[in-house]
Image (cartoon, grey):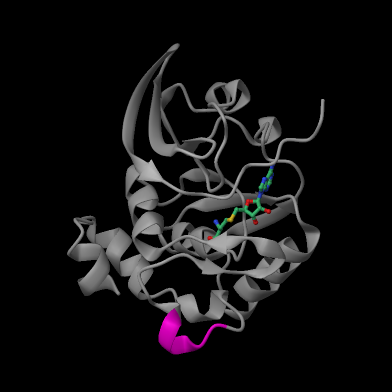
Amino acid sequence: MVAQQLQRRGIRDQRVLEAMATTPREAFVPGVPASLAYDDRALPIDAGQTISQPYMVARMTELLRVEPGDRILEIGTGSGYQAAVLAKLGAKVTSIERLPDLAEAARERLRGLGIDGVDVRVGDGSTGDPDGAPWDGIVVTAAAPAIPMALREQLDPDGGRLVIPVGDDVQELRLLTRRGGSFEERRLLPVRFVPLVAPPR
Ligand code: SAH
């Protein structure tokens, strides 16, 4: 997976490659044969949700430029795979999942694998986690119609990064970097994620 998919498609960050090489993806896709778990595609997890293809996890992780000790917020825990990769990089991860069953399964899976450093919480992540702000990085693994203002505001003013898929049917991955009161925005590549569900207001 690392050589054929990630390196070949341009993932260069050695620490990210190493983190992915040492995180057993098969443990995150229950019911999927181990022979398919490392394929270059998204796979179904429970509750109609999906775990992203390995390349997308690698790319999003690389964009976050995680340093050991960084405080990272993930929105959309799903299987817990992305959170596990972030924890392998030494991040202190808070991951929010709206579906309690998925959150509990992810928690147990991470515990079983001996991966600490991930705090899985049940709730709506569309407004981030202001109590934990400022965040060194925020990664959203579901697509939002627009970049939520609350997430921008929770980024560390000194270079905080937000990686988020934006759009409905047509989506693109964006990287926002905060410097003080200004935000540099890069539009990266077309993507396809399940929707970020916002509660009715
Ligand atoms: N990062 C996951 C894949 C996420 S799939 C992994 O590595 O496996 C997207 C997840 O976002 C789903 O589990 C979905 O339930 C969750 N989700 C959608 N809207 C959400 C919201 N508003 N708050 C928290 N989680 C949300």
Q: In the image, is 13 to the left or to the right of 94?
A: left
136 with respect to 179 (left or right): right
Query: Which residue occupies the foreground of this view, 15 or 195?
Result: 195
Per the image, is 51 magenta?
no
Residue 175 drawn above or below residue 120: above
Screen quadrant of the C terminus: top right
Where residue 130 appears, as percent x and y from the top left, is: 68, 30
Question: Looking at the image, is 80 positioned above or below residue 114?
Answer: above
At which x and y percent is residue 152? 53, 24
Position of the N terminus by quadrant: bottom left
- At x 46%, y 45%, the residue is 70
- Residue 67 visible somewhere in the drawing: no
Give the magenta part as a residue range.
Answer: 32-36
Q: Looking at the image, which residue sits at the far right?
A: 201
Instruction: State the residue at coordinates (40%, 52%).
Output: 68
User: Taken as a whole, is the magenta stretch helix, strand or loop?
Assistant: helix
Residue that lies at the very extreme toward the top in this rendered image: 181
Query: Does the magenta run of residues contain 33?
Result: yes
Residue 153 in the image: x percent, y percent? 57, 21
Q: Is residue 45 above or below residue 66?
A: below
Residue at 55% in and 41% down: 143
Viewer-proximal residue, 114 or 57?
A: 57
Q: Nearer the viewer, residue 188 or 81?
A: 188
Residue 34 percent coordinates (x, y): 47, 87
Identify the residue shown where x is 58% and y is 66%: 116
Q: Is residue 194 above or below residue 118?
A: above
In this picture, residue 183 sits left or right of residue 122:
left
